[in-house]
């Protein structure tokens, strides 16, 4: 795809792919097994006419596969043609289908005869890998065994792509599964590639992803250090201000306690207005007269004492634009606002009764605030002056990151006749350092059962089939369970990975789908 004069490399991914496709094509001829090939790169031919799609088709034809059995999904321009092509795959007329994740992802229901799926390259998102695998690992597949091949070339960008997919999948799993009780999930961050880093990748060095992860980790550590400095500032300010607040709350609590005792001691006293005591019947008339004598409007807040209630002074506070307040005062003053509709003697007496009986509730609230303030003061005093615990980690990671950056750029120089560490050694040191400082913020939650919508399709199928094969005594058939374990390919060549998953039909219903 880069050079019109490039020679055909015998061990290339395309050639290995063709070998496996032809082998499976011959082996499954009796049941007309079908295969899918996913390739997102090279969908459109280069200026000199090269396309991986065309190369695969030509080599498969040369190996004996009929041309009519190897269409590309791009040949079906309309939805009707696409559905017709899918039907040919389902009935075995088309046995090898080639296309991209976008064209053959969601909505491609051709699993009936699929025996193998091939990843010629890696997509950008873990969800796209799941979409690809979901074409073959789904209910309705009549084959007992399904093979998935992933092809990678050593020393190429493949290593970076699959490592990035692993990192992204791990990041996404932290959020979706809920197994981790931590409330922050770490991604590798968006790091632009420099010319030197691109050159390092092209030379077969995937350590650039480690550099991106180190940059993201340094960014996180820098933010944590800033938060630590902010916490130290808050601690200094709180240690300075909290003693005054504690003294104020203690003083108010003492006054509320004293007023509560006064109100209880004079609970049976008559109400005193204007120096004279009145009984329950007469107090309404006298109080009404006092209220009617109050000014209708005032220019500023005006406090007007009226008498004594349960040993405590009471009166009215008039406001320029709002309804008046009823206050009750002893060692401290408490007030309650009246509504615009109810400002007569009954409303005033009800407000006084609520104020007199509310000292205990108010005192409890102040007591809680005082305990919180005292606890905060002890906490801030313990934190004050503490150094940033991750400072050594930050310094060491910064040094290793700078060395790796220099090594990747090719500008490292030997100033003291000692050979500098290699890129792979630096990358390994960074990974080991990060692993040594990975600490869960909170304990792991106990695993919870997720709904089917949250499970991968393969997990759901395995769980259902195993559950269906449990015998009447409540014990699973060991042979069935073993059939669902992932097994390695006995002839796995270097650089090639294969996942083989086996399904067994329901033993009580031979016609049930796998």
Image (tube, helix red, strand yellow):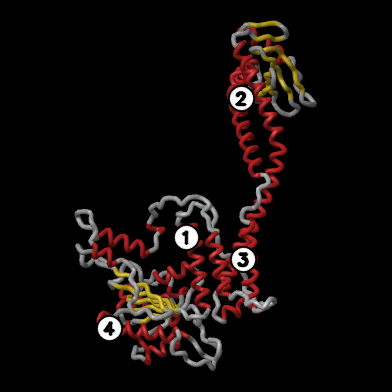
Pick the front one: 101 or 68: 101
Side of 425 where 227 appears, left or right: right
Q: Earlier in the sequence, mark 1 or mark 3?
A: 1
User: Residue 260: in sight, yes or no?
Assistant: yes
Which residue corresponds to the image point at 65% horizontal and 55% vertical from the top-left? 225
As helix, strand or loop, the secondary structure at mark 3 comes to: helix
Q: Which residue is mark 1?
A: 173
Q: Which mark is residue 127?
A: none
Residue beneath disc 2: 363
Whether residue 347 is visible to the viewer of this picture, yes or no, is: no
Graded by Cα atoms within 10 Å as few (under 14), some (14 to 19) or many (20 or more), the crowding at tag 1 reads some
Q: Earlier in the sequence, mark 4 or mark 2?
A: 4
- Alpha-carbon span between mark 4 and mark 2: 87 Å
Q: From the viewer's perspective, is the residue at label 2 or at label 3 nearer? A: 3
Q: Earlier in the sequence, mark 1 or mark 4?
A: 4
Locate the C terminus and report the quarter of the image it occupies. Answer: bottom left
The Cα atoms of the two marked residues, 1 and 3, are separated by 22 Å
Q: Is residue 471 left or right of residue 196?
A: left
Q: Nearer the viewer, mark 1 or mark 4?
A: 1
How much space separates mark 3 and mark 4, taking CA atoms?
52 Å
Where is mark 3, residue-wise? 215
Residue for point 37% across, 78% down: 492
Residue 380, image quadrant: top right
Badge 4 density bin: few <14, some 14–19, many ≥20, Cα 10 Å: few
Query: Which element carries disc 2, helix, strand or loop?
Result: helix
Residue 466: image location, x then y, percent: 28, 61
Give the CA separation, mark 1 to mark 4.
Answer: 40 Å
Q: Could you tell me how far apart the alpha carbons at marks 2 and 3 are, in whole angstroms? A: 53 Å
Image spot of residue 363 (x, y percent): 61, 25
Q: Helix, strand or loop at disc 4?
A: helix
Residue 29's disc is 4
Q: Is residue 301 above or below residue 453?
A: above
């Amino acid at each position: 795809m880069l050079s019109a004069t490039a020679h055909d490399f015998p061990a290339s991914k395309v050639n290995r792919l063709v070998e496996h496709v032809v082998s499976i094509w011959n082996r499954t001829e009796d049941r007309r097994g079908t295969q899918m090939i996913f390739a997102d790169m090279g969908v459109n031919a280069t200026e000199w006419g090269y396309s991986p799609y065309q190369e695969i088709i030509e080599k498969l034809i040369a190996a004996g596969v009929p041309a009519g059995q190897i269409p590309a999904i791009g040949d079906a321009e309309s939805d009707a043609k696409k559905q017709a092509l899918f039907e040919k795959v389902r009935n075995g007329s088309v046995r090898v289908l080639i296309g991209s994740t976008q064209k053959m992802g969601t909505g491609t229901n051709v699993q009936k005869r699929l025996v193998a799926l091939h990843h010629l390259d890696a997509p950008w998102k873990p969800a796209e890998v799941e979409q690809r695998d979901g074409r073959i690992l789904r209910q309705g597949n009549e084959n007992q065994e399904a093979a998935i091949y992933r092809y990678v070339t050593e020393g190429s960008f493949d290593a970076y792509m699959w490592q990035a997919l692993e990192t992204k999948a791990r990041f996404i799993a932290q959020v979706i599964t809920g197994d981790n009780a931590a409330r922050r999930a770490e991604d590798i961050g968006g790091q632009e590639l420099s010319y030197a880093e691109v050159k390092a990748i092209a030379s077969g060095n995937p350590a650039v992803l480690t550099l991106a992860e180190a940059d993201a980790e340094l960014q996180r550590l820098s933010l944590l250090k800033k938060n630590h400095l902010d916490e130290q500032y808050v601690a200094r300010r709180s240690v300075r201000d909290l003693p005054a607040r504690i003294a104020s709350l203690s003083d108010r609590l003492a006054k509320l306690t004293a007023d509560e005792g006064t109100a209880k001691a004079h609970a049976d006293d008559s109400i005193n207005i204007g120096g004279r005591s009145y009984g329950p019947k007469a107090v309404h008339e006298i109080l009404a007269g006092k209220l009617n004598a109050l000014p209708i409007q005032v220019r500023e807040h005006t406090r007007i004492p009226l008498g004594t209630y349960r040993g405590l002074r009471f009166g009215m506070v008039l406001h320029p634009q709002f309804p008046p307040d009823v206050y009750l005062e002893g060692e401290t003053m408490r007030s309650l606002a009246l509504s615009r509709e109810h400002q007569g003697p009954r409303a005033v007496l009800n407000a006084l009764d609520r104020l007199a009986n509310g000292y205990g509730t108010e005192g409890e609230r102040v007591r809680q605030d005082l305990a919180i303030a005292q606890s905060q003061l002890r906490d801030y005093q313990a934190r004050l002056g503490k150094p940033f615990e991750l400072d050594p980690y930050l310094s060491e990671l910064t040094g290793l990151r700078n060395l790796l950056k220099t090594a990747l750029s090719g500008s490292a120089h030997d100033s003291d006749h000692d050979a500098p560490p290699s890129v792979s050694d630096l990358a390994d040191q960074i990974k080991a350092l990060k692993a040594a400082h990975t600490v869960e913020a909170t304990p792991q939650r106990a695993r919870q059962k997720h709904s089917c919508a949250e499970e991968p399709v393969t997990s759901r199928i395995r769980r259902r089939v195993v559950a269906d094969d449990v015998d009447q005594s409540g014990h699973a058939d060991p042979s069935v369970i073993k059939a669902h374990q992932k097994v390695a390919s006995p002839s796995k060549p270097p650089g090639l990975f294969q996942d083989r998953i086996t399904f067994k039909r329901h033993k009580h219903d031979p016609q049930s789908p796998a």
